[in-house]
Amino acid sequence: MSTYLDYFAMTDRNYLHSLRVPSSSDPLRIMMSACLSGIMCGYDGSANGVYPSALKLLNYNNVRLIKFCPEEYSFGTPREMCDIHGGTGLDVLEGRAKVLTETGVDWTEGMIKASEKMLEIALVQKVELAVLMDISAACGSQVIYEGNRFGENKVYQIGAGVCGAQLIRNGIKVISQRDFASLEILYSKIDPDHEINKEALDHHENEWYKGYFQLA
Ligand code: SF4
């Protein structure tokens, strides 16, 4: 198993188990991809679909959601779709890869600025966890596209988007809306009536992920 997957398989799950039990007077501070909360900030002016696993977080008064859309911050809405070319979000931050729109416009600089803004907000707000939209070139945490997703051969890669990587490398724990096992632990912290579903899997544990990336 790679170091990257270790991050999700062990570090995050242990971290989630160690989260405090929040109250309405001292809520858990969770950064959230704005679109996951239903805000219409997707590239096409939609919310990128409906994800009950994340939307449920809106129901608790012992959770304070800090919602942010990094792409809207830098590029507005609606905007072109963009993807990472030549590496992962971490590679973008370290100058080895680029963010290009579907028509080839270079958005690398704007995306890095957006990631820095997201990190600044996370630090100022003292977020304790981030729940981000996976697959996004900005907010992805476990899997992203390699190159233009609208190209003839759609290719996925293991890795985080630029903003996900920025948070992770600065010590902020990130899970996605598809990390169902991790979300189960989170909900057990914020809801005393929640019983953990032990059958739930995180994204990197599901059949599609393991089959596509040929993991044992
Ligand atoms: S940049 Fe992040 S918050 Fe904004 S639409 Fe894309 S996935 Fe959602």
Image (cartoon, helix red, strand yellow):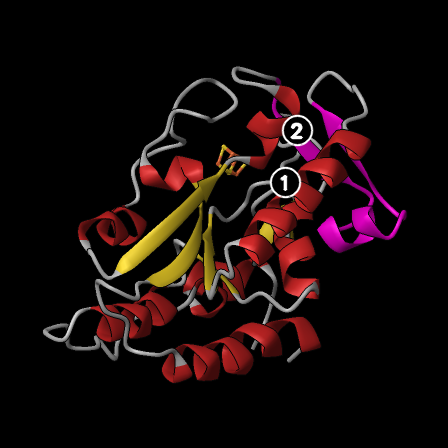
Q: Is residue 100 magenta-colored?
A: yes
Image height of 72 relative to 186, above or below: above
Note whether residue 147 is visible: no
Image height of 120 relative to 103, above or below: below
Residue 21 image offset from top left, x and y in percent: 28, 77
Q: Quadrant of residue 196?
A: bottom left
Q: Residue at x 18, y 51 (%)?
A: 59
Q: Which residue is mark 1?
A: 137
Type of amino acid under label 2: Cys
Q: Quadrant of residue 41?
A: top left
- Region of the chain picked out in magenta, as a range: 80-101
Which part of the image, by quadrant, shows the C terminus?
bottom right
Residue 65 image offset from top left, x and y in percent: 36, 50
SS type, badge 2: strand
SS type, badge 1: loop
Q: Residue at x 39, y 24 (%)?
A: 40
Q: Which residue is mark 2?
A: 82
Residue 102 image offset from top left, x and y in percent: 68, 21
Q: Closer to the camera, 200 or 20?
A: 20
